[in-house]
Image (cartoon, grey):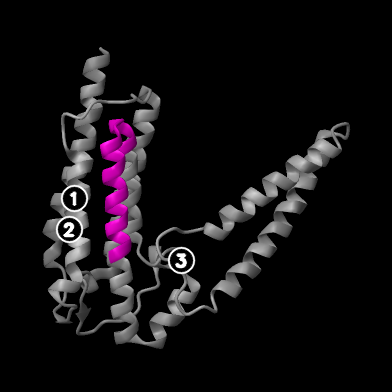
Amino acid sequence: MQFSLTTSIDRAFATAWGAWFVSWMLAAIWRSRAVKRPSIGEQAPYRVLTILGAFLLFRRGDPELWKPATSVSYALLGLTIAGFVFTWWARIHLGALWSGTVTRKADHRVVDTGPYRIVRHPIYTGLILSAFCTAFYRGNLLAIAGAAVLSLSFYVKARLEERFLREELGDDYNRYAQRVRMLIPFVMLLVACTHARKAAHGAAGMHERRPVDYHFASGYVEFADACTRASSCRRTAGRQLHPEA
């Protein structure tokens, strides 16, 4: 039964990746004409990294160093599919402006709706999530390395795209980049949550004899203060011309 269940989850992962890839290739016909693109030499590094990362992530025969529990496997599968859904959400919002390579379209403009309000490169963000969830399910270090190399390839490609778009779209893209993170959304919110949690634990240690609702109130106040500080930090960082992801 365990072998059968494991095999069915393996097939579900393979089906999810296959369905995403085929649908993505079919949707490639939905794009407008490109008028400018970087040289092949400029695009070669991310292409090589993408091929290497995919090879390591999906290669067979590597020994498993761990095997996730069934519930964890299903959770990883769900997150993998969620990553694909995120990429398609972005693809729909891009419409005919999408391209599989770095290009400028005839009617190119800054898209800041849908997932592009959350992160500047949501397609890469979704694929990074799917790649790492798949790698952790596979349970070997080469798969993890493959997901890491794929992430590096997306980062390299994103940097190339951004340099290209800054040159082509100018201040419109610079203002957008100041407002929205590159690949990892909600960074400052995570920092605020971490700070608030530490502060709440400190308050709990100092007032362990107080009623439990005191801890909730104290934690809430600390969280609000931390969010305010995080928001201020983000506004300061937004003044930089080239924010990091």
The count of marks equals 3
Q: Residues within 10 Å of mark 1 (few under 14, many from 20)?
A: some
Q: Quadrant of residue 111?
A: bottom left
Res 123 seen here: no
Res 51 seen here: yes
* Residue at point 35%, 38% (across, down): 78
Whether residue 178 sits left or right of residue 60 in the image: it is right
Most foreground residue, 23 or 51: 51
- Determine which of the numbered discs, if any, sits on residue 48 in the image: 2
**Residue 61 included in the magenta stretch of the image:** no
Whether residue 199 sits left or right of residue 159 in the image: it is right
Q: Which residue is mark 3?
A: 181
Name the residue at the top extreme.
Answer: 1
Identified by mark 2, the residue type is: Val
46 versus 11 height, above or below: below
| Residue interval drawn in magenta | 134-156
* Image location of residue 101, percent across then percent down: 18, 68
Q: Which residue is mark 1?
A: 52
* Image location of residue 176, percent across then percent down: 44, 77
Quarter in which the C terminus is drawn: bottom left
Q: Residues within 10 Å of mark 2 (few under 14, many from 20)?
A: few
